[in-house]
Image (spheres, rainbow, N blue to C red):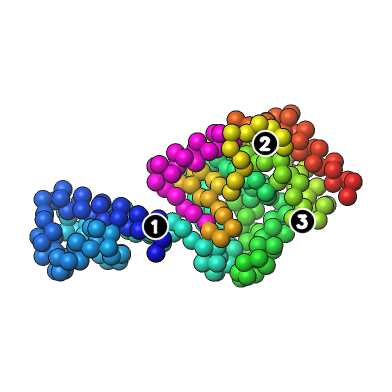
Amino acid sequence: MTTDFQQARVALGARLRELRTEAGLNGRDMAGALGWQPSKVSRLENGKQTPTPADMDAWAQASGQPDAASELKGRLRGLETRYRTWRRQLSAGHRPRQEAGIAETRRTETIRSFEAGVIPGIFQTADYARHVLTRYVDLRGTPRDVEQAVSARIQRQNALYEQGRKFRVLVWEGALRVLICPPDVMAAQLDRLIGLLGLGNVSLGIIPFGVPMSIAPGDGFSIYDERLVISETWNLEMWLDEAEEIALFLKIWATLDSSAVYGHQAHRLIARARAALDTL
């Protein structure tokens, strides 16, 4: 059990205690209303035991706040989904994860993203996505549903053309030059990036090599409005919804953004990387 898992379980327990005290019940009264041993109420409230969804329904009813059940079960799901190894996250293949990204994008007005080593998925061509996903399938030994995952990733890009959505994306210059695919595929991908510079709802910043920076480029992440951060490492994907964590990632994004260039300067860097492919 990770420290972060335990912290989330303790936070859930504190919320359960809050609902009980708001109802004017002590622990023994709550146990009687639920038909439980008092020790179970104590363990749940102190983060010593993981409740079930049925426990959450029962607790909300006994507290006189049945509408709180959905919130409690959402917090419970968060215990499992907060930190997931890629092997677990991708146990059914890449397509379900891509579809989860589509769902989060539909719920979001402004997405802020950063990538240091690859072109962001929302901007990828099908050929580039195919090579990227194939490399990671090989690395992690996950189910080979690459074509279905590519299709879902391309479907997600429909959001780029929907009114009311904004994409504020930062890319380190290194991502423009990492040949995780053949040169001709990379050339088409960079052409795609140049074409996206003209979209009114897309803000694409490039962080150049050699520019002064307050922090070093790190793992990629996306911030969905100000309600969710999805951050990726080599072995984990983290879904973070605590206000303090979201505030930290917003600060990280803003700090990286202060070193980025936009408009014709970004165009120049992409074009320079595109021209370098002709010498290979």
Q: What residue lies at 59% left-to-right and 51% top-to-bottom?
A: 156
Q: Specify whether residue 80 is painted magenta.
A: no
Give the residue type that dot 3 points to.
Cys
Q: What residue lies at 10% left-to-right and 65% top-to-bottom?
A: 32
How many residues crowd around disc 3 within 10 Å: few (fewer than 14), some, or many (20 or more)? Answer: some
The residue identified by callout 3 is 181
For the N terminus, which image quadrant?
bottom left
- Seen in the image, is 34 located left or right of residue 151? left
Q: Label 1's element?
A: helix
The residue identified by callout 2 is 207
The residue identified by callout 1 is 3
Marks 3 and 2: which is nearer the front? Answer: 2
Query: In whole angstroms, how far apart are the C-alphas of marks 1 and 2?
Result: 34 Å
Give the residue type that dot 2 points to.
Ile
For marks 3 and 2, the one nearer the N-term is: 3
How many residues crowd around disc 2 within 10 Å: few (fewer than 14), some, or many (20 or more)? Answer: many
Classify 31 as above or below 22.
below
Q: Nearer the viewer, residue 235 or 98?
A: 235
Determine whether label 1 and label 2 are within 8 Å by CB: no
Give the residue type that dot 1 points to.
Thr
How many residues crowd around disc 1 within 10 Å: few (fewer than 14), some, or many (20 or more)? Answer: few
Q: Which residues are magenta?
A: 237-256
